[in-house]
Image: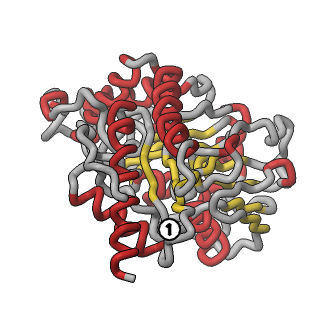
Amino acid sequence: MVTNTPATRPANPRFSSGPCAKPPTFTLDTLKDAALGRSHRAAIGKAKLKDAIETTREILGVPADYKIGIVPASDTGAFEMAMWNLLGDRPVEMLAWESFGAGWVTDVVKQLKLDAKVTTADYGKIVDMAGVDYDSDVCFTWNGTTSGVRLPNGAAIPADRDGLTLCDATSAAFAMDLPWDKLDVTTFSWQKVLGGEAAHGMLILSPRAVERLESYTPLWPLPKIFRLTKGGKLIDGVFSGATINTPSMLAVEDYLQCLAWAQSVGGLPGLIARADANAAVIDRFVASRDWIANLAEDPATQSTTGVCLKFTDARIADGAGFAKAVAKRLEAEGVAFDIGAYRDAPPGLRIWCGGTVEASDLEALMPWIEWAFEAEIAAQTQAA
C-alpha cells in the first residue's frame, strides 16, 4: 500500500552531487563586489585571488610551507596537471574504487603510457591502503563521489615514504579532516563541498612535491596551461594569485563568499559537523527500512558527502529502471533534483550531504523517498 503523500517538502530540493547546493545564505547580491571588467593582474584582482588562497589555507589548516594554487578546469584540470608534471620519475601505483579514480587510471596507462600497478575495488568497497607500496608514487581519491565510500583516515600512509601521494579530494575537502602530512598533492574544486561556481580547481603541493617538480622533467611535452616550472624552478606566482590563465573574477568572488560562509558556521569543524549530521539523517532512515541500504559495505568507509544508496527489495525486477523511475517521481514532485546514481555506478540514489545542505531538508526528503519507492512498487505490480 502506498503511503500518503508527505505533507512537508524540502525548502531546497537541490541534492545533486555536482554542481552542489550553494550556501544557504547565498543571493546574487553577495557578488556585488566582484572585480568585473578588471584585469585579474591588477591590484584588486591579485588581492582577491591571494585572499582566496590564504583563506583556503586558514580554513583547511594547510601548513604554511605548502603551496596553494588556483588552476584551470576544475578538479580535473588540477589532478591532470599534477599527474602530467610529477609522474614518471619512479614506479606508479594507481588506486581506484569509483568512476573518477578509474578515469585517472585510464589517463596514466593509456595517455602517459606508464607501466603502472593498478589496484581496484568494486563499488561500495575500498582498496586496502595498508597493502600499497608507498615507495611508488600513489594516486587515489579520498572520497568516492560516485561510490559513496571514503578513506576513514590516513593511518596507512607512512610518514617516511619515498614516493609522492597524489590525492583527488574534491568531495572531501571542507567536509572531512585531511591529514596534510600524508598528502603531497591535493586537488579539489570550488563547486563541490562549498557549492562554488565551476571552472577553477585548487592544487596544493607539499615541499616534497615542489622538490620533485624542480628536480624532474617528464619525458612528454607539457602544454602551456599545465606548466608549473620554468628553468627548473617553480613558477611561484601561480601559488600567490598570478594564475596560468585568466580566471572568472565573478567565480572568484563567489568562492570568497563561500569561504566567508564557511567561517560563519565554525570553519572546518563546523562544516564537518554539518556533513556528519546530514549523513546521519539518511543513516537513521536506511537503518529502519529493509528495502534500501547504503552502497558502502563498511560503515567506517561510508561517505558523509556523496551518500550512495541501493534498493534491496526482492520484488524489483529491473534495478536500473526502478531506480530511475523513483528519481523521476521525486523530480516531478519538485522535492529532489538529480539524485539518480552516477551513470557508471550500480543503480540507486546518490544524495549530496555536504555542509551547504540543511539537515531539515534531508529530514523532509526521507518520507518522499519512501513514498516514491512504494508508488513505483505498486506501479510495477500493476503492470505485471
Q: Is residue 86 visible to us here?
A: yes
User: Is 286 above or below relative to 271?
Assistant: below
Which residue is label 1 attached to? Answer: 347
The residue located at (32%, 26%) in the rendering is 47
Q: Amino acid at mark 1?
A: Pro
Instruction: Please provide percent x and percent y for residue 308.
Output: 52, 53
User: Looking at the image, which is closer to me, 239 or 252?
Assistant: 252
Please, what secondary structure does the residue beneath circle 1 have? loop
The residue located at (70%, 41%) in the rendering is 300
The residue located at (50%, 52%) in the rendering is 78
Instruction: Please provide percent x and percent y for residue 222.
Output: 53, 64
User: Is 186 above or below relative to 323?
Assistant: above
Say whether residue 145 is left or right of residue 55.
right
User: Looking at the image, which is closer to me, 242 or 64?
Assistant: 64
The residue located at (84%, 46%) in the rendering is 162
Q: Residue furthest bottom?
A: 384
Q: Is residue 81 visible to us here?
A: no
Q: Say which quadrant the C terminus sits in.
A: bottom left
The quadrant in which residue 288 appears is top right
Say whether residue 110 is left or right of residue 43.
right
User: Looking at the image, which is closer to me, 112 or 175?
Assistant: 175
The quadrant in which residue 151 appears is top right
Instruction: Please provide percent x and percent y for residue 277.
Output: 49, 29
Say whether residue 362 is left or right of residue 152.
left
